Image (cartoon, grey):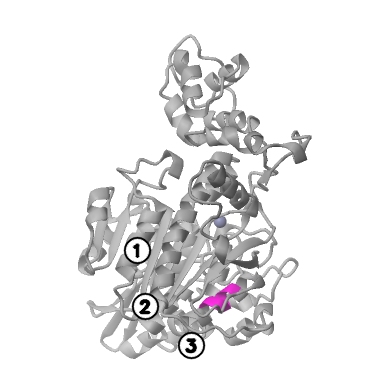
């Protein structure tokens, strides 16, 4: 059934290019990046002499990607990268899991019988089939949608405890990003047991790390600050983390799979923060430069760079720019170039600022002279609690949103929405033999390209049926029960005197109390009261 479903998705009926397999595959995702942001970032780089007329992606741009959910043309981060990773478009919230059928709206064939089936990812295939090293580098908390899509399975992206545990038990060689508050005692103990180094909020130790063991380095309780607001002595850039990941992963003689996410272009776009969008994209682009340097020197590495979806309808030019064809580069890019913080970064400063200093501080960071009206707007922000005579009746918005509105009023960037958008996204790629995914690719064709570039032999559908089999099939005829008294359910199976215990969201089972290491994670879905586990576990009893 599984094979049937996968072979009838429209992607695989189309022309399939020849792609020579390479030892390493790197996927880079600037989350929620519409092409307008890339264009503005390029002009900003030129205008400010930040390094040439081109972005790092420019020589490698080769096509576009049509990215969508299983039942909606505009996707959420969870299903969109899940489609790249598994080959199956999914629904909002789904992390590498087969969607529930929505017959009236489904854009592809969806088999109702397969709802909630965890689907093997490219990262899991690299590890499981080829013993490659695996790594994830992001600037948000590690169980956030995009990294989760590569390495965990659940129908709801917000269920961090389940997703974080799977990511820890996935035995990744490298995990760099945020999310210290999400690390549990169980995860710490597992890292100790497996010789995984955990570096927390310690840039020096991270920078000096030269080990060959598995390594997690996390900065901040949740997400990293925006790159423009980042303190480099405390938190490494995406480019630095990426370079470190390449150093570590390239020591594996079987090669590696790495996913790098420019996570917060999307967040700036949601907030309609133009300078945030531009500088977050540029921080991502600097990571692309590191990766392309590595790939070209290495000669055995495929790289693809593509957003997961558009966001905000960002444009250069908007309704109040009447003589758009006479607008100079100064008119378009001078003011934004003087913004030294994002709206959020400036808010953090202003929330601690005495009202009497507001105008001068605002000027210092933006070169904007606040009007009295703007000043009053800021002072009456919902989240401004300064004790003084200036306190006004709160307005309904936080200060960052008013700051962004003021900053945007001095530019000509347009936004049509604070949400995701459904246009195609750019595609850039490097392959040592020039076997590129040119033209318009669907999200599932991207999965096929990654599969081919990796030289995988067993289809993801077959692998899915091997490592994520239903417990009722694996232990047919045996006595089993599911203990749901704890937050992580446990499957217990009896045969004669033997008891096999399988906790959910980990990669370990216990035969009569003795640990058995699994090569993949276990998943429990409450909706159908089912454990998804390696088929090979049947032979343990
Ligand atoms: Zn996204």
Seen in the picture, residue 327 relative to 253 is either above or below; the reply is above
Give the image location of residue 470, x and y in percent. Answer: 47, 80
Observer-nearest of 207 and 115:
207
Q: Quadrant of ligand 1?
A: bottom right
Vertical relation: 406 (above or below) 148: above
Instruction: Write down the residue under mark 2.
Output: 255
Residue range corresponding to the magenta coloring: 446-450
Residue at 36% x, 70% y: name it: 170
Note whether 287 is above or below 44 in the view shown. below
Q: Verify whether residue 448 appears in magenta.
A: yes
Give the class, few, some or many, for how many residues have Cα within 10 Å of label 3's Cα (few <14, many ≥20). Answer: few
Which is more N-terminal, label 3 or label 2?
2
- Which element carries disc 3, helix, strand or loop? loop
How far is disc 2 from disc 1 in space, using C-alphas?
13 Å
**Which residue is labeled 3 in the image?**
458
Q: Residue at x 42, y 76 (%)?
A: 299
Q: Pointer 1: what residue?
A: 245
Q: Locate residue 291, reporting x and y percent.
A: 43, 64
One can see residue 19 in this view: yes
Q: Earlier in the sequence, mark 1 or mark 3?
A: 1
Is the C-beta separation of discs 2 and 3 under 8 Å? no
The quadrant in which residue 286 appears is bottom left
> Within the image, what quadrant is residue 499 found in?
bottom left
Residue placed furthest toward the right: 322
379 inside magenta stretch: no
Which of marks 1 and 2 precedes in the sequence?
Answer: 1
């Amino acid at each position: 059934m599984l094979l049937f479903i996968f072979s009838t998705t429209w992607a695989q009926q189309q022309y399939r290019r020849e792609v020579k397999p390479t030892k390493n595959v790197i996927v880079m995702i600037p989350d929620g990046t519409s092409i307008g942001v890339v264009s503005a970032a390029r002009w900003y780089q030129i205008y400010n002499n930040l390094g040439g007329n081109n972005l790092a992606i420019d020589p490698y741009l080769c096509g576009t990607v049509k990215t969508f959910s299983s039942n909606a043309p505009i996707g959420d981060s969870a299903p969109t990268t899940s489609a790249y990773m598994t080959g199956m478009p999914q629904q909002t919230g789904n992390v590498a899991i087969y969607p529930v059928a929505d017959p009236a709206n489904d854009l592809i064939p969806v088999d109702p019988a397969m709802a909630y089936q965890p689907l093997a990812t490219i990262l899991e295939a690299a590890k499981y089939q080829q013993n490659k090293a695996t790594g994830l580098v992001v600037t948000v908390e590690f169980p956030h949608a995009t990294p989760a899509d590569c390495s965990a399975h659940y129908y709801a992206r917000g269920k961090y405890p389940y997703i974080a545990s799977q990511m820890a038990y996935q035995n990744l060689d490298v995990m760099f990003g945020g999310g210290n508050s999400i690390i549990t005692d169980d995860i710490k103990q597992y890292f100790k047991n497996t010789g995984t180094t955990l570096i927390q909020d310690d840039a020096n130790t991270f920078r000096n790390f030269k080990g060959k063991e598995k390594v997690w380095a996390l900065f901040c309780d949740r997400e990293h600050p925006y790159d423009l607001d980042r303190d480099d002595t405390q938190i490494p850039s995406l480019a630095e983390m990426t370079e470190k990941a390449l150093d570590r992963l390239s020591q594996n003689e079987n090669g590696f799979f790495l996913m790098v996410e420019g996570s917060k272009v999307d967040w700036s776009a949601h907030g309609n923060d133009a300078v945030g969008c531009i500088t977050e994209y540029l921080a991502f682009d600097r990571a692309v430069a590191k990766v392309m340097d590595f790939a070209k020197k290495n000669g055995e590495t495929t790289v693809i760079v593509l957003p997961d979806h558009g966001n905000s309808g960002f444009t250069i030019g908007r309704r109040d720019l009447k003589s758009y064809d006479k607008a100079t580069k100064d008119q378009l890019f001078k003011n934004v170039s003087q913004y030294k913080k994002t709206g959020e970064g400036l808010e953090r400063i202003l929330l601690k600022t005495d009202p009497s200093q507001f105008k001068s501080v605002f000027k210092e960071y933006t070169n904007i002279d606040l009007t009295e009206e703007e000043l009053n707007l800021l002072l009456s922000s919902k989240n401004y609690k300064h004790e003084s005579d200036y306190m006004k009746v709160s307005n309904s918005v936080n200060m960052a949103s008013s700051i962004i509105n003021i900053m945007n009023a001095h530019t000509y960037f347009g936004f049509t929405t604070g949400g995701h958008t459904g246009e195609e996204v750019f595609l850039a790629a490097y392959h040592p033999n020039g076997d590129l995914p040119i033209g318009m690719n669907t999200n599932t064709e991207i999965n096929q390209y990654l599969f081919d570039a990796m030289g995988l032999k067993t289809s993801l559908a077959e692998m899915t049926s091997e490592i994520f089999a239903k417990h009722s099939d694996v232990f047919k005829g045996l006595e089993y029960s599911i203990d749901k008294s704890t937050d992580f359910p446990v499957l217990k199976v009896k045969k004669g005197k033997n008891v096999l215990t399988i906790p959910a969201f980990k990669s370990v089972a216990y035969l009569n109390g003795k640990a058995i290491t699994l090569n993949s994670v276990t998943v429990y879905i409450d909706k159908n009261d089912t454990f998804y586990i390696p088929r090979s576990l049947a032979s343990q009893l």
